[in-house]
Image (cartoon, rainbow, N blue to C red):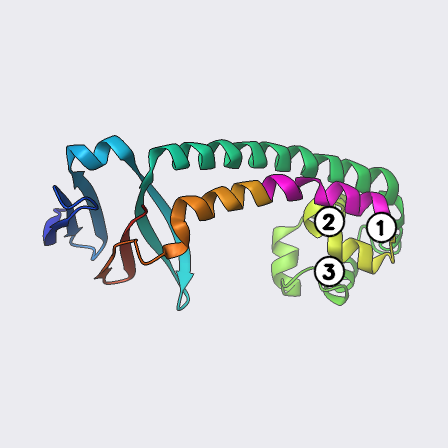
Amino acid sequence: MSWEIVSEVKEPCGCGIGFVITVVKSDDWNRTEETISLQCSECAKNYVRYSYDYHSSGMIETSTCWVKKEEYEVFCQLKSEFEALEVNVNKDLTDYLRLHYLKPWMNLFNDGAQNKKAVWSKLRMLGLTSYSHSTFGNKIKVKDLNEHIESFVTYSFVHQLTKILSINDKNIETISISTQKARQQYEEARRVMMKLLSPLIKVETLTCKRYTKKREWSR
């Protein structure tokens, strides 16, 4: 199996002194690989590469940006702090839900906790599973039914849980929004870094079979 160069594009960099070189390769299995390199010592002093995925027309595409180093460092620090806080908050919320609402939740399934069809029917009625009965039966063992039911008492199902059990608990909201400020700071840092795709950003687009790569310059 060999990789062959499909295209090689050489374009001016952000400052106009050097170049950005994009090489696209394809193999015998019709897979593609793209390599983007910055060939400019001046830009390398002030910029760093940042890539992110986004959805477009039902496909996941990737954009590659060169952003200012100092802004990228601030963004990474705030993002790291937010993600660490989010992990702790999600754990706290799950612990709180299980402490106060696990029992009433399990009571909903008392009549069929050891019956796959009864559990599946209840979850389908509550809108908590998209599995067919046969798929549910193949994936969930009888001995794991209680554990599966308990798995819905977690932060990721907090909205469904509060609706189903008619919960009105301000502590849940307090815990849930405790990451709000950190998220706002992290998102604002990203907006500053990306400059909201202002007219000063140079954008080039390269389409490669199943995906699109964009190269951007933030100033």
Q: Which residue is mark 2?
A: 152
Secondary element under disc 2, as helix, strand or loop, is loop
Question: How packed is label 1: few (under 14 Cα within 10 Å), some, or many (20 or more)?
Answer: some
Q: Which residue is mark 3?
A: 120
* Quarter of the image where one finds residue 128: bottom right
Q: Which residue is mark 1?
A: 105
Question: How packed is label 3: few (under 14 Cα within 10 Å), some, or many (20 or more)?
Answer: many
The three-letter amino acid code for the residue at tag 3 is: Trp
Q: Which residues are magenta?
A: 170-183
Q: Residue at x 34, y 42 (%)?
A: 50
Q: Residue 105: x percent and y percent?
A: 84, 50
Q: Residue 141: x percent and y percent?
A: 68, 48
Q: Is residue 200 above or below residue 154?
A: below
Prevailing secondary structure class for the magenta stretch in the rendered image: helix
Q: Which badge, 1 or 3, comes first in the chain's sequence?
A: 1
* Quarter of the image where one finds residue 199: bottom left
Residue 117 versus residue 33: which sits nearer the camera? Answer: 33
Q: Residue 189: x percent and y percent?
A: 48, 42
Q: Are circles 1 and 2 on residues that touch, CB within 8 Å?
A: yes
Q: Residue at x 42, y 66 (%)?
A: 58
Question: Label 1 vs label 2: CA separation?
Answer: 9 Å
Q: Residue at x 41, y 44 (%)?
A: 193
Question: How packed is label 2: few (under 14 Cα within 10 Å), some, or many (20 or more)?
Answer: some
Rendered image: mark on residue 218: none
Question: Label 1 vs label 3: CA separation?
Answer: 15 Å
Q: Are circles 1 and 3 on residues that touch, CB within 8 Å?
A: no
Q: Residue at x 56, y 36 (%)?
A: 83
